[in-house]
Amino acid sequence: MLLELRNVVAGYDGGDVLKGVNLPVLEGSITCIVGPNGAGKSTVLRAVSGLLRPRVGEILFEGRNIAGMSPRHVLELGIAQVPQNHSLFNDMTVRENVRLGAFLLNDHAQVNRALAYVEDLFPIVRERAHDKAGSLSGGQQRLVEFARCLMLNPKLILLDEPSMGLDPRTLKAVFDTISVMHASGRTILLVEQNVKTGLGAASHGVVMESGRVRLIGTSGEILHHPEIGRLYLGGALAGA
Ligand SMILES: Nc1ncnc2c1ncn2[C@@H]1O[C@H](COP(=O)(O)OP(=O)(O)OP(=O)(O)O)[C@@H](O)[C@H]1O
Ligand SMILES: [Mg+2]
């Protein structure tokens, strides 16, 4: 197990959103969290990445409790997050944006090695290196965000709704890229509204509802669970 949430209770001023979340993420998996709006999916990612301090519970990463650590410390330990909303600086070039992902590194040579690595993995980063990030399409910007998050060579990558706002063709390109990141040896924890695409790309699935985990299994078990479409996903799987 690479990451494990144990009885995590966390929320905002309005009260607890996560009401005792238990969630395992196996090393080498692509684990996809699905569930209705407001279920607490993004809040789980925020608790893991250090943006939100849990009130109760433990978040174990490689056996070490990271609950309440600063985002910077969590990043140093090897967990990178790509946020739900577009996060590139439009007026900076693609390469400048990607370099920002290495802000924790002081060694210039190390930064250049990391840049060469992500450019080999994602050719668009090299091809469009000197273009302004704002001139890229939504899907291309997503790929650059992925490239940026790889600059510190994370073990675990957190993705919040990578399919948001993308047309079907771009969606496929983005998920192909997630496969590339996974094949390069990383564990992926993602949140997806697009249940078929998310679970279809994942090895494991987690269904959340009202701040709790309702179901855990392989992605196939979750996709084919008789109750899923009807109870939790608003019939999204009906006819799938
Ligand atoms: N910054 C915040 N301050 C206060 N309440 C928040 C904040 N962010 C989220 N919430 C509340 O927490 C609950 C869970 O939100 P969260 O964003 O984790 O849900 P989600 O499952 O990711 O939903 P969605 O599918 O809409 O992205 C919601 O009721 C939401 O209104
Ligand atoms: Mg969300």
Image: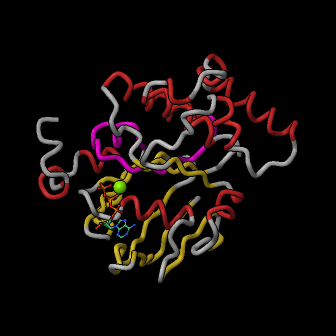
Percent position (x, y) of residue 162? 41, 40
* Residue 41 among magenta residues: no
Q: Residue at x 61, y 35 (%)?
A: 147
Percent position (x, y) of residue 228? 19, 53
Q: Residue at x 55, y 29 (%)?
A: 133
Q: Residue at x 43, y 65 (%)?
A: 23
Ligand 1 position by quadrant: bottom left
Q: Is residue 209 left or right of residue 55?
A: left
- Compared to residue 53, the image places residue 102 above or below, namely above
- What is the magenta range? 184-202
**In the figure, residue 49 lies in which quadrant?**
bottom right
Percent position (x, y) of residue 194? 29, 41
- Compared to residue 159, the image places residue 37 above or below, namely below
Residue 4 seen by the camera: no
Going by the picture, which residue comes out furthest to the top?
127
- Compared to residue 11, the image places residue 90 above or below, namely above
Percent position (x, y) of residue 127? 63, 16
* Residue 196 among magenta residues: yes
Q: Is residue 136 left or right of residue 100?
A: left
Image quarter where the N terminus lies is bottom right
